[in-house]
Image (cartoon, rainbow, N blue to C red):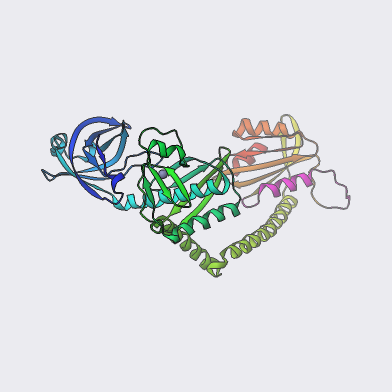
Amino acid sequence: MNEKLYNVDAYAKNFESDVVSVSEKVYEKEQVYDIVLKNTCFFPEQGGQTSDTGFLYDTEGNAVFKVFHVAIEADVEHHLVKAGDVEDDLKADILNLKKVRGEINWEERYDKMQNHSGEHLVSGTVHRFFGYDNVGFSLSSENVTLDFNGTFTDEELDRVEKEVNKAVFENFEVVITYPSEEELKTLEYRSKKELTGEVRIVEYPGYDVCACCAPHVKRTGEIGLIKIVSAEHFKGGTRVTIRCGYRALADYGTKLSSCRSISKLLSVPVDEVAKGAAKLSEDSRALNFKINGLYAQILALKADSAKPEKTNIEGEECEALLIFDDCADMNTARKLVSDRIKPDQDKDNDKETAVGKLICIFIGDDEKGYSFCIGSGEIDCRKLLNTLKTGLNAKGGGSESMIQGSVVATESKIRSLFT
Ligand SMILES: [Zn+2]
């Protein structure tokens, strides 16, 4: 068996090793070189965590090979190098590699150590507070998600966040042990599966005891800030997203910069952007209400001044009021049509009514097409819908007294259907 240096020293960034084998294969539809080493610092993809990446330097030559993925098969790490990343004159060298110096991408690794360690504190604390298990875990360079078989209130998650950050500020040592089978029998620890053979136990004293194969930080202070950034319902439980250490710092930076931009736009202090946004939303609702009132008046004026067109709908003579507008919305159009097709109750009302006529409102423009709402007190509008569908390939539906839909055609094409 090869030696897993990442288990011996999580802080080892480089190492030297004999090469056990180099072979060519296809990995996820890509031609790769698969390099097995006597020992390695590269943590492979396992337990929900993506693998380390880095470089292998040929110690007997000048070649450098970029490791983009490390897989583990039968407890052996396979360091994969894309064939496309290896220059033609080095293809023979890579197949004859004897000794290498390996170097992992330390920034990426340390970031994962901070986030994996933070995950243990969160999962252990959730288990201690609420008895829920972590039933799914994913840690990549972009995201950390924890799936729990239970649900939380916002206050409960705040409580968890406070507790785990307390552990960070206490800056205590993380204890890693390999208990005997006998000791394991009496030890209470979290584990996702039944374990056999040597079990690596990672303990955050007072907060969590868990079987785990991944590299952790030495002391909790190194994790840095732990932020729970979202929680959503997932498979009957909750998917929690966290950010720890440098990621939490970057996240704070991104969010603060957003808040500053909003603060400038709204002319309110950074701490009051939520209040400012609420006021803006309220103002915008009031403004929309006013605008819709104006649109309603404009449409009504257009309806009153429109000259009725004599038309023939499937053999039936009638008059149609055609109104085109590029601003009003369909709710306003619908309301006007529905008002105008009611029998005229006020005989003195000099409004142009649509009883015995068709009132046709088209909202849109020649480029994008039109949405329409058409109504009548007497004529079966569905007949007109047929004409629109056959003549202009319109889409829509409705009842005898009102139809709605959309049509991609110019105003003159639509008008020509009525004349
Ligand atoms: Zn773990």
- Which residue, as the protein is rendered here, is positioned at the far front? 182
The location of residue 222, given as percent across then percent down, is: 38, 57
Q: Is residue 99 magenta?
A: no
Which span of residues is magenta-colored? 326-349
Q: Quadrant of the C terminus?
A: top right
Q: Is residue 229 shown above or below 2?
A: below
Total numbered circles: 0
Residue 78, can we see it?
yes
Residue 57 locus on image (x, y percent): 17, 45
* Horizontal and vertical percent position of residue 49: 39, 42
Q: Which quadrant holds the N terminus? A: top left
Q: Position of residue 166 (x, y in %)?
A: 49, 59
Is residue 81 shown left or right of residue 300? left
Which sits in the foreground, 99 or 12?
12
Q: Is 273 on the left or on the right of 289, as rendered?
A: left
> Would residue 210 be found to the left or right of residue 267 on screen?
left
**Closest to the observer: 225 or 331?**
225
Q: Residue at x 71, y 29 (%)?
A: 314
Q: Residue at x 85, y 43 (%)?
A: 343
Front residue of this view, candidates 282 and 247: 247
- The answer to whether one can see residue 191 in this image is no
The furthest residue to the left? 60
Residue name at image x 59 percent, y 65 percent: 276
In which quadrant of this rendering is ligand 1 seen? Answer: top left
Q: Is residue 341 magenta?
A: yes
On screen, residue 151 above or below 254? above
Between 365 and 397, the one lying in front of the other is 397
x 41%, y 36%: residue: 182
